[in-house]
Amino acid sequence: MSRARSIWLVARRELLERGRSRGFIFSVLFTTTIIIGSFVVPVLIFGDEGPTRVGVVEPAPDRLDSAITTTAVALDQDIAVVRFSDREAGETALLDDQVAALLIVPADLSTPGELAFRESPDPTIQGVVGSAVAGLRVNAALEAEGVDPTTFVEAQTPPTVRALEPPEEGADTRFLIANIGAVLILVGVFSFGFTVLTGVVEEKQSRVMEVVLSTVLPRDLLMGKVLGIGILGLVQLAVFVVAGFIAASLTQEFELPATTPGAAVQLVVWFILGYTLYSTALGVLGALASRMEEASNASTPVTIVAMLSYFVAIFAVINDPSGPVAIAASFIPFSAPMVVPMRAALGAITPIEILVAALITIAAIWVLFVVGGRVYSGAALQTAGRIRLRDAWRSAGQ
Amino acid sequence: MLEINDLAKRYGNVVALDGATFSARPGRIVGFLGPNGAGKTTAMRCIFGLARPDRGEVRWKGAAIDRTTRLRFGYMPEQRGLYPRMRVGEQLGYFGQQHGLSGKQAEAAGRRWLERLGLADREKSKLEELSHGNQQRIQLATALVHDPELVVLDEPFSGLDPLGTATMTEVVREEAAKGVGVVFSSHQLDLVEDVCEDVVIIARGRIVAEGPIDELKASSGRRHLDIEVAGTDGAWIGALPQVQVLEHSGGRMRLLVDDSVPLDELLTAARSAGELRKFSYQPPRLSELFMEAVAEPETEPAEAAGLHR
């Protein structure tokens, strides 16, 4: 039987046993519900209210409706006007909350009229309706004085707007993608990576390790575990992303960020590389622990390295993506998965650099599997206390 | 044939194996005996590549053992353990497949073993839901699910009730009858005497006795004589050469006799002493051979050496 099949059997066992467990299904359903909820609930609570309705009592000036809606648009408000034949009908509607306010203005605009609310006045409606009425009255007064309408239309033109440092097209999206990569890898390390860690300790604790290792090579067992839990993690992430995407597009609150497919592919590739690197390291350290309580201690070095890499990425690299810190961090295996996709999203890395960084990371993963396999076989059958890395290495040696 | 050649292994300052050499033949049941810490588990782990010997090697059918060879072996470690939350049927299927069976073959083999062990209705149960004894049965099935050519069982009888012991014995005998080589370690020497044809005794990392139980007994050079003579206090024994009194109460005695002393001479002496009621002349029991074999060489060097063939 080939080693590849042996590795796949280990991975498949992890996939099936974990994927079918009630805890896993529950946590995926729970998180998916929260993701969908975060899009749907605001809509349900705040609703798609439509325009605020303002009632106008006849008779009123013809131009009043368009004056109110135009002013509202200029102030980024959505206001619709409803006409009522008499004051009584309008007030009934106001008391029934069919309209938010009721405006009574004489058709000749001789007085500013009256704006009625049911309880407390709404300053926004007050502002919009107030400016519309005032504008109409000023126009009427000027026209009465014989001023040419084009003159005051021209006089009402606002100043032109200019920004000295306009933001780049798509800069927000790039920044978002850059940050998502680093966060995803951190999440990958702390959830799926730690699943690998606890999985290894469980096998030691249940003593099944000796039976397994009598057939499966230590390195293959480690690889299979990382592979199986990794696939499960990717499936989980895919479910979350798809659920969020569907919920978002149904509630129409979301536009697909305008990103290049290249950036998205890099994100996935570096997520896989980062997860594999960190979870392999965690699996090896897990073999050094004998009980769950020791596992978190054993994993401390990896936790520290992951956090350091994350901080380097979000503080140093994002501010100066082409600087010396960013370049150095791209070629260090543990920081590369966070730094490289970030620099790529910001357009601050060359394809050659990406390739070299990827090769270095893959080489580091391979070294970890080889070193890890040996430490694993040295430590896997020692079930008392915490084993030192050096002792595990030696006892597996010649 | 499994050959263990000159295995040596030390853990720090502790010598686990110190040049151990023995073999196990197909179709024979070998009892692998030794006091705690003598090196039994380490030797078994060396067979499965779980411990790397400092010196020496393990060979199967004349060739050095590698991963592919080991797929045809079955192992039940002293520290039992399977996946607690995995279903029993799938567990057997998984280990069957890891030993090279296809998914279907492994499933069928797992089912066959569950039926054989009377656990067919527990196929869908999680291992942790089974009683301790039944978990042990599953552990045995795990070692045998792929029809191995060699089965190595580390203390298979420990923690078993009489029913479990009977099943284990039966299964081990059946496997050997099929031509499978069986090596198992145990401290229950009476059981070993009952089940095994061959024994290997290890002490301080070295093999101190090896061979068919009958031959070991015959070659021990010592015989036990249980004798009961009425109407005498046993003073007549003093006249006999090379006889050691192990137990003595009234006319009943248990004697240790060198096999060079002719049986006739003993019988005549006993008859002339009084009325002979019991005369039982036997080779030593396995437990007695064991005690002699593993004794510290400083105290009884001649006997230990004498037993080592």
Image: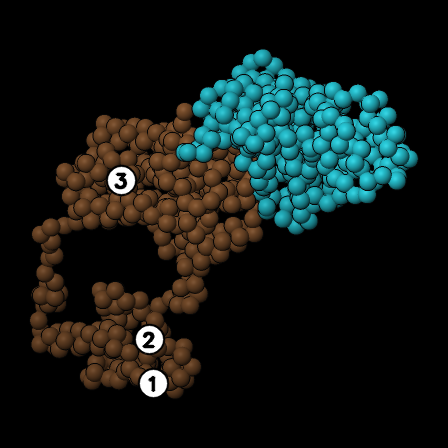
Chain colours: A brown, B cyan
- Name the one closer to the observer, B211 or B104: B211
- Disc 1 and disc 3 in contact, CB within 8 angstroms: no
- Disc 1 and disc 2 in contact, CB within 8 angstroms: no
Labels 1 and 3: the sequence-earlier one: 1
Q: Is residue B19 left or right of residue A93?
A: right
Q: Residues within 10 Å of mark 2 (few under 14, many from 20)?
A: many
In the rendering, which numbered label is found on residue A119? 1
Q: Can the viewer see residue A386? A: yes
To which residue does mark 3 refer?
A335
Residue B82 vertical placement versus A33 (above, below):
above
- Tell me the quarter of the picture where residue A111 sits: bottom left
Q: Is residue B228 left or right of residue B115?
A: right
To which residue does mark 2 refer?
A54
- Disc 3 and disc 2 in contact, CB within 8 angstroms: no
Q: For marks 1 and 3, give the CA distance.
A: 59 Å
Q: Amino acid at mark 3?
A: Ser
Q: Residue at x 54, y 26 (%)?
A: B206
- Name the one closer to the observer, B136 or A254: B136
Mark 3 or mark 2, whichever is nearer to me:
3
Q: Quadrant of the C terminus of chain B?
A: top right
Q: Quadrant of the N terminus of chain B?
A: top right
Q: Is residue B14 left or right of residue A318?
A: right
Q: Position of residue A333 (x, y in %)?
A: 28, 35
Residue B293 vertical placement versus A165 (above, below):
above
Q: Residue at x 25, y 47 (%)?
A: A308
Q: Amino acid at mark 2?
A: Val
Residue A265 vertical placement versus A253 (above, below):
above
